[in-house]
Image (cartoon, helix red, strand yellow):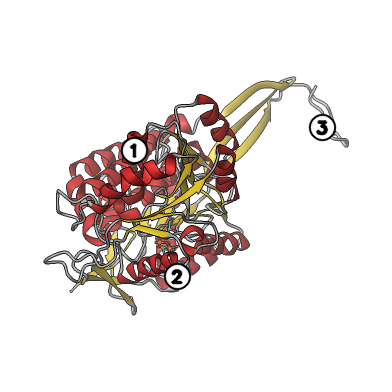
Amino acid sequence: MKVIGHRIGGNLVSDESSRFGDVFNPATGEVESKVALASISDVDKAVNAAKKALPEWSETPPIQRARILFKYKQLIEENIDELADLVGREHGKTLADAKGSVVRGLEVVEFACGIPHLLKGEFTEQVGTGVDSFSIRQPVGIAAGITPFNFPAMVPLWMYPIAIACGNTFILKPSERDPSCPIRLTELLEEAGAPAGVLNLVNGDKEAVNAILDHPDISAVSFVGSTPVAKHVYSRGSLSGKRVQALGGAKNHMVIMPDADLDQAVDALMGAAYGSAGERCMAISVAVAVGDVGDRLIEKIAPKVSSLKVGPWDDPEAEMGPIVTKESLDRITTLIGEGEKAGADLIVDGRNLKLQGYENGNFIGGTLFDNVKPGMSIYDQEIFGPVLSTVRVPDYKQALDLVKSNPYGNGVSIFTRDGDSARDFASKANIGMVGINIPIPVPVAYHSFGGWKDSLFGSNNAHGMDGVRFYTKIKTISSRWPSGIKEGALFTMPLMK
Ligand code: NAD
């Protein structure tokens, strides 16, 4: 059976791991390969490779680093079908969706190609007589990224292109569920001309994560995953003196006002709730029906949910694929059962879906609940599956209160024709990314991505200028030349004159 190893210092390393995990094809339920699970010493080797590459890489002019990224962009484009297939085969999402996710990651590479401009500093002439001041951004050193299963291409691409463009070297620890695409992306960067050790990849589980968090030579950690692990990463990484950005889970609401274009809202909800089988941190999992819109909404959406086309990743007709693992599928079906027991109305039940030829696959159909209330586990927990809960509220104020009192704060959207309520909502929602008649308001690469509340720990978002800020330290230099004023020895606070 194929064994997926680590990529350290430009070499494939797999023989020293004593632990391995299974990598499944979620459509067939079969183990397709084994993945090495890194030990503390494997992480140490990756750190040594990153350390060795750091002095030369950090001194390479930004324009030369950018040229490698331009080549990388071209290689990703040339290999996009293979990359999308690797995503779909191990994650389960459809090829079209997988390809879209690679393209959204590629946009961050395109952003990072502008690094000479992005790293430009600030200069002030004459802050005092004959004294100039300038601030520059320098790399933090060795950075690491820990990423979730649901975007094996896009989320790693949020991180290392910017980190290495800034002059850092990097260690990626992708999800052990779907490691093949990240490994291929690492190889392509080497092919593009990145010196060995600039980007290293260790596969693994919590042992590798904790080794990264404790390692004294790693200066910055980017994490994307569930909230409990994000909290752990943030506190343990900070404790060992690192800067940490840890993006967590979500429970994203879509508020549908009575005046919304209902056809538009229903189409938007279908894609946002059931695309990628709901395994997106920006998926909409709660529809908030305001005033009298509830009955009309359920009437329009229920038949569409019932007729969702579910299939394997390579079925061009499929609108959504299987769930990543049997454990995730069990969690989702258990939560559906709990929702029913708690008294929510199960309008469409996706359990028991069987696909001919894929009887052992992790398939579930689209599921729709009405009359869901806070306090029910289907409302309170992140289901991360194709389950949409409808909550009915009498007016806009209660919709806003519901959104505001949710502990998560990743994304939210409002569907309305009324500019006043849209503007008020965008201003008052305590959520990091807001859509107005846009169901999944994922910012483009040159803006930054991040939630509020339990959806992000740390002060920097992912990518955009926040990415550049996270992966660099500011240094401010004040200079005077001998022709300037000579003040003699100063024993008081220096004041600029
Ligand atoms: P996860 O938290 O289980 O795993 C994420 C990473 O952490 C993986 O690399 C995994 O190996 C590691 N990990 C898992 N358990 C650990 C532990 N106990 N200690 C240390 N490391 C551990 O998340 P997942 O299931 O892979 O991904 C789904 C979650 O990610 C969802 O909650 C989703 O909302 C979230 N997510 C958030 C964003 C965002 O931008 N906020 C984006 C994508 C996914």
- SS category of the residue bearing label 3: loop
Name the secondary structure under disc 1: helix
Residue type marked 3: Pro
Answer left or right for 191 relative to 342: left
Residue 387 in percent (x, y) is at: 37, 57
Quadrant, the N terminus: bottom left
Residue 214 in which image quadrant: bottom right
Query: Mark 3 = which residue?
Result: 494
- The residue identified by callout 1 is 107
Please report contact status of discs 1 and 2: CB closer than 8 Å, yes or no.
no
Query: Residue at horizontal 51%, vertical 62%?
Result: 376
Dot 2 amino acid type: Lys
Tell me if the residue at label 2 has its CB under 8 Å from ligand 1.
Answer: yes
**For the residue marked with disc 1, what is the amino acid?**
Glu
Is 418 located above or below residue 447 in the figure? above
Instruction: For mark 2, give the secondary structure.
Output: helix
Q: Quadrant of residue 90?
A: bottom left
- Name the residue carrying label 2: 206
Q: Tell me residue 64's x, y (percent).
A: 36, 36
| Contact (Cβ within 8 Å) of mark 3 with mark 2 | no
Mark pair 3, 2: CA separation = 50 Å
Q: Earlier in the sequence, mark 3 or mark 2?
A: 2
Q: Which one is in front in this view, the residue at disc 1 or the one at disc 3?
A: 1
Across the whole image, how many numbered discs are drawn on residues? Answer: 3
Q: Residue 494 appears at what percent x and percent y? A: 82, 32
